């Protein structure tokens, strides 16, 4: 991937604040605030290119929400359903047994997303 000026500016926005979960819309708004003139298509294309290059991990907790995680290590997430927020689960999860892959296949990644919502009494 060629380090174009736009890619470098978006990479600075994405990675300067440490590990985080962003949507294309969030990054687009950050670019506007930083006076970086880009189309939303450029944002999506760049996020997809960074994902393909292994710099980001794509997480889709439901059919309408897509996050990009700057921490590409395998780790579990909480998805706050009513708030559209994705956060890392701080505890280590232990799995007693992993399923076997189908014949002729191998497991390429494990994603765990725990969907949670605030209790009605806490709202």
Image (cartoon, helix red, strand yellow):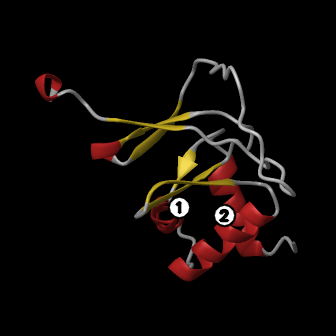
Q: SS class of the residue under badge 2? A: helix
User: Where is residue 100 shown, x and y percent of the image?
Assistant: 77, 40
Q: Residue at x 72, y 32 (%)?
A: 98
* Comes first in the chain, label 2 or label 1: 2
Neighbor class of circle 2 (other Cα within 10 Å; few <14, some 14-19, many 20+) is many
Q: Is residue 39 visible?
A: no
Residue 48 in view here: yes
Q: Which residue is mark 1?
A: 27
In the rendered image, residue 95, in percent from the top left (x then y), is placed at 67, 23
Instruction: List x then y, in percent, for residue 13.
Output: 63, 55
Query: Residue 18 falls in which quadrant of the image?
Result: top right
Q: Split into 4 quadrants, where in the image is the C terminus?
A: top left
Q: In the image, 14: left or right of 55? A: left
Tell me: residue 13, above or below residue 36.
above
Q: Could you give the CA–CA distance between mark 2 and mark 1, rounded to whole angstroms? A: 8 Å
Q: Hey, which quadrant is residue 81 in on the image?
A: top left
Residue drawn at x 55%, y 47% as measured from the top left:
21
SS for tag 1? helix
Q: Position of residue 113 (x, y in %)?
A: 51, 39
Query: Badge 1, how many Cα within 10 Å: few under 14, some, many 20+?
Result: some
Q: Which mark is residue 112?
A: none
* Nearer to me, 89 or 95: 95
Whether pointer 2 and pointer 1 mark residues with C-beta atoms closer than 8 Å, the reply is yes
Q: Residue at x 66, y 33 (%)?
A: 75
Q: Is residue 61 left or right of residue 122?
A: right
**Residue underneath mark 2:** 10
Q: Is residue 48 above or below residue 79?
A: below
Image position of 120 (left or right of 106): left
- 1 with respect to 119 (left or right): right
């Amino acid at each position: 991937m060629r380090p174009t000026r736009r890619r470098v500016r978006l990479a600075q926005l994405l990675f300067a604040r440490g590990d985080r979960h962003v949507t294309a819309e969030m990054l687009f708004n950050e670019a506007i605030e930083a006076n970086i003139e880009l189309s939303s298509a450029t944002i999506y294309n760049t996020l997809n290119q960074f994902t393909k290059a292994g710099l980001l991990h794509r997480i889709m907790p439901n059919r309408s929400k897509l996050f990009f995680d700057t921490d590409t290590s395998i780790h579990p997430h909480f998805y706050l359903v009513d708030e559209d927020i994705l956060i890392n689960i701080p505890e280590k999860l232990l799995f007693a047994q992993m399923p076997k892959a189908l014949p002729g296949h191998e497991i390429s990644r494990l994603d765990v997303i725990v969907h949670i919502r605030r209790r009605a009494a806490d709202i």
